[in-house]
Amino acid sequence: MSIDRDTFENTSEEELADLSVPDQVLGFLDANEDRAFKAREIASQVGVDEGAVSTALSRLKDRGLVEHKATYWAITDDTERLEGYSGYKRATALFNEQLGKENTESWREHAPGEPHPSVENKQ
């Protein structure tokens, strides 16, 4: 699916090259979710040929992962659709390999004992 802004800024081009063009495009759009871009701008930012980016954008649009208006492209705001995209699993596997897998037990050790006050109590 996508990568977070920190990963986008701090991961080398070689490491990001392991991601497919659609994954790179989707990652860029996700990191810039408040903006829309022309295909040429996306190609420039991810370092991929504009033709490949245009093809990726069309395929991502067919899957409902990006939106297109005039010459601009933006990531969808449908988070469920994005979470279901198989590229998310590939990107996660790549980053787990490069950065190490998250330790669930470590997260649990530091998790709060009570839910956040914004979460309604379902009792």
Image (cartoon, rainbow, N blue to C red):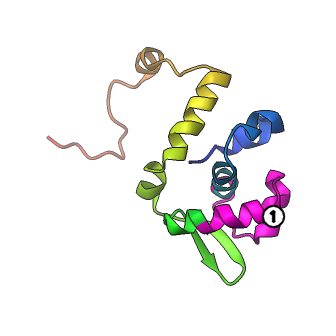
Residue 81 is at least partly visible in this image: yes
Figure quadrant of residue 73: bottom right
Image location (x, y in percent) of residue 42:
77, 62
Q: Is residue 25 magenta?
A: no
Residue at image location 46% in from the left, 21% down from the top = 107
15 on left or right of 101: right
Residue 75 is at least partly visible in this image: no
Pick whichever, 25 or 37, lies toward us.
Answer: 25
Identify the amino acid type marked 1: Glu
Q: Which residue of the protein is positioned furthest toward the left in this rendering?
A: 123
Q: Which residue of the protein is positioned furthest toward the bottom in this rendering?
A: 70
Magenta residues (range): 30-58
Pick whichever, 80 or 52, lies toward us.
Answer: 52
Question: In the rendered view of the protein, which quadrant contains the C terminus?
Answer: top left
Residue at image location 85% in from the left, 59% down from the top = 44
Q: Secondary structure at mark 1?
A: helix
Is 59 situated above or below 123? below
Q: Which residue is mark 1?
A: 50
Figure quadrant of residue 10: top right
Q: Residues within 10 Å of mark 1 (few under 14, many from 20)?
A: some
Image location (x, y in percent) of residue 78:
46, 62
Image location (x, y in percent) of residue 114:
32, 29
Q: Is residue 34 magenta?
A: yes
27 on left or right of 76: right
Pick whichever, 25 or 121, lies toward us.
Answer: 25
Is 33 situated above or below 6? below
Main secondary structure found in the magenta portion: helix
Q: How many marks?
A: 1
Image location (x, y in percent) of residue 59:
58, 64
